[in-house]
Image (tube, coloured by chain):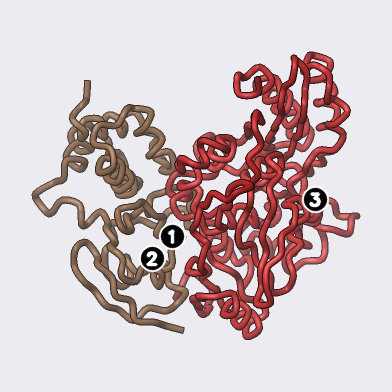
Amino acid sequence: MSLLPSFELIRAASLAEVAAARRLHADCRLLAGGTDLIANLRHGLGGPAALVDITGLPGMQEIAAEPAGIRIGAGVTLSRLADDPLIRRHFPALAEAAATVAGPTHRASATLGGNLCLDTRCVFYNQSDWWRQSNDFCLKYRGTVCHVAPTGNRCHAAYSGDTAPVLLVLGAQAELGDADGTRRIALNELFREDGAAHLALGAEEMLLSVRLPIEPRLAAGYEKARLRGAIDFPLAGVAVSLRRRDGALDGLRIALTGTNSRPLLLSGCEALIGGPCDAEALRQISKLVQKQVSPMRTTIVPAHYRRRVAAALACRLAARLFSSPATA
Amino acid sequence: MAMILSLTLNGRQRTDLVPDNLLLVEYLRDMAGLIGTKRGCDGGECGTCTVLVDGVPRHACLTLAARCGGRHVETIEGIGSPGRLSRLQRAFHEKLGTQCGFCTPGMIMAAEALLRRNPNPEEAQIRAALSGNLCRCTGYVKIIESVQAAAGDAP
């Protein structure tokens, strides 16, 4: 008697092989580090006929310097991302964010692509099969009602990846591919505000890599609030990137995770450009955050706390980065 | 589906027929009979199933056995031998790092990987390396003292 549902493990060595496996098994799942997928399968969240091991695809494990920036393969592990000298030199905030994901043992096998494509989370979803069955399941899987917002028509499970907000404020692009070729999109276009279908990927498409431009004098950081300090998904996570010129803000981007069904790149930050990052600017940032995030009852911590903690983290981070020597 | 799995388990070559969906923790406990590796939360949250795969700590409850082909897997049974405790086992014994003992195999495997990588870790590095391992008796102070003792820099 096995703990996991029955499936076939297929090792793919090319995008064509991934496509062939997907045509053979429409419900197959892609497997990299497996730290989230295997735990979910153990909970009966999905019963795919096949898992496709994508860690052997060419280029997936590379971190490469390019003329315009750095390319990070989707299969790079989070522990490597946290320690890599190139990443630490150019994008210390990304290394910091990677180091806050789960525990050290997870990070040794969990990958950047897995963290970006992380399944959304909810107290009504991340439960055992018998728990969910006794609750008549939920809209995200096998049910018809979202217990978070029963009168609504969509799933409100929260996106909880820690690396996405940092990549968004650093201006990342995502490289997607299938058997027919590859394409590049702004990372922001990879996500949708729907907890049951939060990735805007084609039927046979997968994330291959992320490209980051190197922007001089751009300071960035990431902070997250969580229940268990050592291992936990964010109740709210905030990334900020900014530049300073002559004592004024010259570029400001803020992105959040844990508060919506997608990582949220805040709009309206450009209104603060040209002014100082003073108490009034921080009040404006707090307002922007509280207005745009929409935390729901997806964790055991109330939504209004997560809204306020997201705003507080954004202000604290912006103030710290503005006074850091890296921006001068 | 099933496959032939060949790996090195605690220094010995083994070959078994394993189903594709077999977890490493099931393989170790049910097929290899090595019940030192514990099944705790079954979800990567407690760390008691921690084993070393090619010297790196891994959750045996989140790892497919079929993906361990050609690898070196080490469990608590491969650390020390009957009557000859390893330095970490001896330190956990002498410094009372073991209380109920359920987390101990995972703690020792995670600490073993740390000490191989860094023979003289600072306390903060020990805490970081063990941060994925829960002790349900909450005896963390004694566990950290045990690792310090094993590293030879106990106060």
Q: Which mark, residue B61?
A: 1
Please, is residue A17 above or below residue B93 in the view?
below
Q: Chain of mark 2?
A: B
Q: Relative to residue B66, is residue A125 drawn left or right?
A: right
Residue at mark 2 to residue at mark 1: CA–CA distance: 6 Å
Residue at mark 3 to residue at mark 1: CA–CA distance: 30 Å
Of tags 2 and 3, the one toward the viewer is 2
Q: Secondary structure at mark 2?
A: helix
Q: Which residue is mark 3?
A: A148
Q: Nearer the viewer, residue A60 or A300?
A: A60
Please, is residue A168 above or below residue B149 in the view?
below
Marks 2 and 1 close (CB-CB < 8 Å): yes
What residue is rendered at 52% in x and 41% in y? A87
Please identify the quarter of the rendering in which residue B126 is found.
top left
What residue is rendered at 33% in x and 45% in y? B110
Q: Which chain is brown?
A: B
From this viewpoint, is residue A327 visible?
yes
Estimate how packed mark 2 is, as few (under 14), some (14 to 19) or many (20 or more) residues with alpha carbons within 10 Å: many
Residue A200: x and y in percent read 76, 62
Where the N terminus of chain A falls, by quadrant?
bottom left
Q: Which residue is mark 2?
A: B24
What residue is rendered at 66% in x and 68% in y? A177
> Of label 2 and label 1, which has the lower sequence position?
2
Residue at mark 2 to residue at mark 3: CA–CA distance: 36 Å
Q: Which chain is red?
A: A
**Amino acid at the residue labelled 1:** Cys
What residue is rendered at 56% in x and 78% in y? A50
**Amino acid at the residue labelled 2:** Leu
Q: Secondary structure at mark 1?
A: loop
Q: Nearer the viewer, residue B128 or A255?
A: A255
**Amino acid at the residue labelled 3:** Val
From this viewpoint, is residue A228 visible?
no
